[in-house]
Image (tube, rainbow, N blue to C red):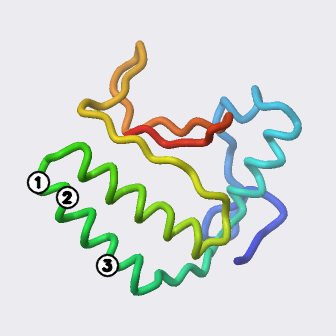
Amino acid sequence: MVITSEAQNAAGVPVAMPAYFYRLSARGQRSFLKSDSLVRFDFVPSSAAIALTAGLADALQLNATSAVEAAARALSSELCRIAGVKQLRVDVMGVRPHVARGELHGIFYVTPPQRIVL
């Protein structure tokens, strides 16, 4: 993993921050900048992760929410294990979550219990 000290694009040129950046707390801004400064993350999926990805693709073809959720949870668990990060729960809904402005691709809850809703 390579981290730079300021927000830059792939060519190393400083980039403008999105408007919401300035509404973040100082801690939130530091976290954003640290995350945004990653230019490379060396991640090698395990053979289990590759097999679980194929299993998720198969479950998606079945169009069965419970099968997709089980496959997504198994894959998420393996990816978190490989990355050495805390596990999170994945919930799959029958419809996309939405807010007043429209549909979302998913929701990531950072408050305990941490989970992703798809």
Q: Is residue 80 left or right of residue 13?
A: left
User: Residue 106 lies in what quarter of the image?
Assistant: top left
Q: Secondary structure at mark 1?
A: helix
Q: Is residue 40 left or right of residue 98?
A: right
Quadrant of the drawing holding the C terminus: top left
Residue drawn at the location 77% of the way across and 57% of the way down? 34
Q: Secondary structure at mark 2?
A: helix
Residue drawn at the location 40% of the way across and 17% of the way down? 101
Cα–Cα gap, marks 2 and 1: 5 Å
Q: Secondary structure at mark 3?
A: helix
Relative to 5, is 90 above or below?
Answer: above
Where residue 4 appears, as percent x and y from the top left, is 79, 68
Where residue 22 appears, as percent x and y from the top left, is 76, 31
Per the rendering, the mark at residue 30 is none
Relative to 34, is 46 above or below?
Answer: below
Residue type marked 2:
Ala
Q: Which residue is mark 1?
A: 62
Cα–Cα gap, marks 2 and 3: 12 Å
Relative to 74, is 103 above or below?
Answer: above
Give the mark, 3 or 1, whose residue is nearer the N terminus: 3
Front residue (pair 64, 18): 64
Mark 2 and 1 residues: CB-CB less than 8 Å, in contact?
Answer: yes
Q: Which residue is mark 3?
A: 51
How many marks are shown on the rendered structure? 3
User: Residue 3 lies in what quarter of the image?
Assistant: bottom right
Q: Residue placed farthest to the left in the image?
A: 62
The crowding category of the residue bearing disc 2, from other C-alpha atoms within 10 Å (few below 14, some 14 to 19, many at least 20), is some
Relative to 94, is 116 above or below?
Answer: below
Q: Which residue is mark 2?
A: 59
Residue type marked 3:
Ala
Residue type marked 1:
Leu
